[in-house]
Image (tube, grey):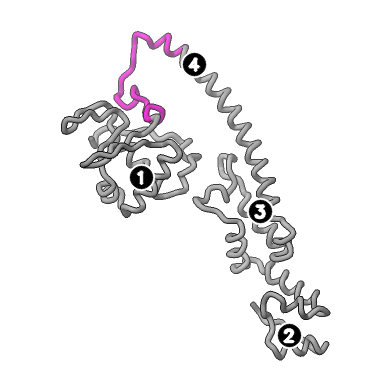
Amino acid sequence: MNNGWISLYRQFLDWEWYGDINTKCLFIHLLLKSNHKEANWRGEIIKRGQTFTSVKHLAAEVGLSEKQIRNSIKKLKKTGEIETQGANNGTLISVINYDTYQNIELVEGKQKGKRGASKGQTRGKQRATNNKNNKKKNENKKNNINDDMKIFNQEIFTDKNEETYGHAMLDEFFLFYSEPTQDGNQMKFQTNATWSTAGRLSTWSKKDFNGNYKAHKDELFIKNLNNPTEVFKEEDIATDEERDEIIGVTKFKLRSF
């Protein structure tokens, strides 16, 4: 079982679960564990691309908790990477489209000589077709990322966010998370397993990397000096004594926050 090797294409970098460490690790482990050819095991036929195991065994082999294994199995089933079939003594896991990941001729080190010429021509045509399809897919992906970027921009630069965080901070946030990945098919924020724009903006403002958020709050504070009720409407950024001084139109002092 430990002999031989598996093929792992560079396109794996674009896989939607690649950024999910647990799920990626489990899927690669299943590729390694799955039968590369049909075999009998305890009276059962385990087909190519299948492995008979259990959540407990997978957790021990991969170094994750059983809960993490179950969550990753659920994700892989949801996106059609695997199928599972339960049994009294374990679970039969089938890797969908196993032959797509593992070319049987390469894995077994065999070549079909007699039909080589005809297959070569067929494969040449197939490669041309695939290249054409891939080019079209890449064009579609570029169009998709442009559309996604416009939607992402609209989601960030709302009137509410502009008022809360200021344009400078939003611009900094957008430039960071809209940066395209190396293949140009996704933006940085799309590689996160989970995403909440509101939550990320809140976290970004607390870190306030270049001071843009504080500058915005200072500007709002000074702008609303003639309307103290607005200044102190949502948060206390001055002591009661400093507030009285402002309302009394005397000197004022900003408290750092």
Question: Going 66% across and 45% down the picture, which residue do you hit?
Answer: 149
Check disc 3 and give the amino acid type.
Leu
Magenta highlight: main SS: helix
Marks 4 and 1: which is nearer the front? Answer: 1
Q: Nearer the viewer, residue 154 or 109?
A: 154
Asked if residue 3 shows in the view, the reply is: yes
Is residue 12 inside the magenta stretch?
no
Q: Secondary structure at mark 3?
A: helix
Q: Which residue is at a point 57% across and 51% down the rendered structure image? A: 189
Residue at the image point whose x is 49% and y is 16% from the top: 124
Whole-number angstrom distance, CA of label 2 to CA of label 1: 57 Å
Task: Give the residue number, with chain letter if any, for mark 1.
Answer: 26
Q: Which mark is residue 175?
A: 3
Callout in the foreground (3, 4): 3
Residue 112 coordinates in the image, percent (x, y)? 34, 14
Q: Identify whether 87 is placed above or below 248.
A: above
Q: For the residues carrying marks 3 and 2, which lies nearer the camera in this image?
A: 2
The residue pinned by badge 2 equals 253
Quadrant for the N terminus in the image: top left
15 vs 239: above or below: above
Q: Is tag 3's residue or tag 2's residue first in the polypeptide sequence?
A: 3
Q: Residue at x 64, y 58 (%)?
A: 173
Residue 124: which numbered mark, if any?
A: 4
Q: Compute the Cα span from label 3 to label 2.
A: 34 Å
Labelled pair 4, 1 in contact (Cβ < 8 Å): no
Mark 2 or mark 1, earlier in chain: 1
State which region is magenta: 98-121
Q: Quadrant of residue 143?
A: top right
Whether residue 8 sits left or right of residue 11 in the image: it is left
Sequence-first disc among 4 and 2: 4
Q: Position of residue 199 (x, y in %)?
A: 58, 61
